[in-house]
Image (cartoon, helix red, strand yellow):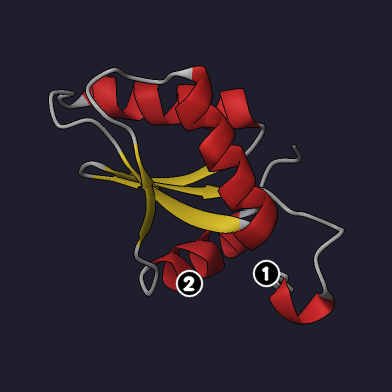
Amino acid sequence: MNELTSKQVRKLRAMGQRLDDAAAIGKAGLSDESAANVERLLDAHELIKVRLPGELEGSARKDFGRQLAEKVGAACVNIVGRTVLLYRPNESLPADKRVKLA
């Protein structure tokens, strides 16, 4: 995935504030099933919020969020508290459902 510009990150973060959590990763961590669920959600929505496990602290949350993004082929837009915002463009979505970055 191409790197996002700071302008694109700002726009995605602003859009992400209005989103509810689409998925949650439980105590079991990042399983193949949870990664597949996140991939399905990204295919359908391009921009999603994922709730991270509660037992992770500080930098471990950031590492986990980046690992999740890498595993599903998405950009990690932002990590705040236990929530990570992921973006992955999907060219096959109709134009009205796509996230407009420009």
Which residue is farthest bottom? Answer: 96
For residue 52, what is the image quadrant? top left
Instruction: For the residues labelled 2 and 1, say whether their Cβ atoms are less than 8 Å apart.
Output: yes
User: Mark 1: which amino acid?
Assistant: Val
- Given residues 89 and 21, the one toward you in this image is 21
Q: Quadrant of the C terminus?
A: bottom right
Q: Earlier in the sequence, mark 2 or mark 1?
A: 2
Up the image or down, 97 lies above or below 73; here it is below
Up the image or down, 11 lies above or below 6; here it is below
Q: Is residue 93 left or right of residue 87?
A: right
Q: Secondary structure at mark 2?
A: helix
Q: Is residue 58 left or right of residue 3?
A: left
Up the image or down, 28 lies above or below 9; here it is above
Q: Position of residue 101 (x, y in %)?
A: 69, 69
Crowdedness near tag 1: few (<14), some (14–19) or many (≥20) residues, C-alpha within 10 Å: some
Q: Secondary structure at mark 1?
A: loop
Residue occupying the point 15% across, 25% down: 57
User: Pointer 1: what residue?
Assistant: 99
Residue occupying the point 59% across, 23% down: 71
Q: Which mark is residue 15?
A: 2
Q: Position of residue 73 (x, y in %)?
A: 67, 32
Q: Position of residue 76 (x, y in %)?
A: 51, 40
| Number of marks in the rendered image | 2
Label 2 to label 1: alpha-carbon separation: 9 Å
Residue occupying the point 78% across, 54% down: 90
Up the image or down, 73 lies above or below 83; here it is above
Q: Quadrant of the N terminus?
A: top right
User: Mark 2: which amino acid?
Assistant: Met
- Given residues 1 and 7, the one toward you in this image is 1
Which residue is farthest front? Answer: 33
Residue occupying the point 82% across, 77% down: 95
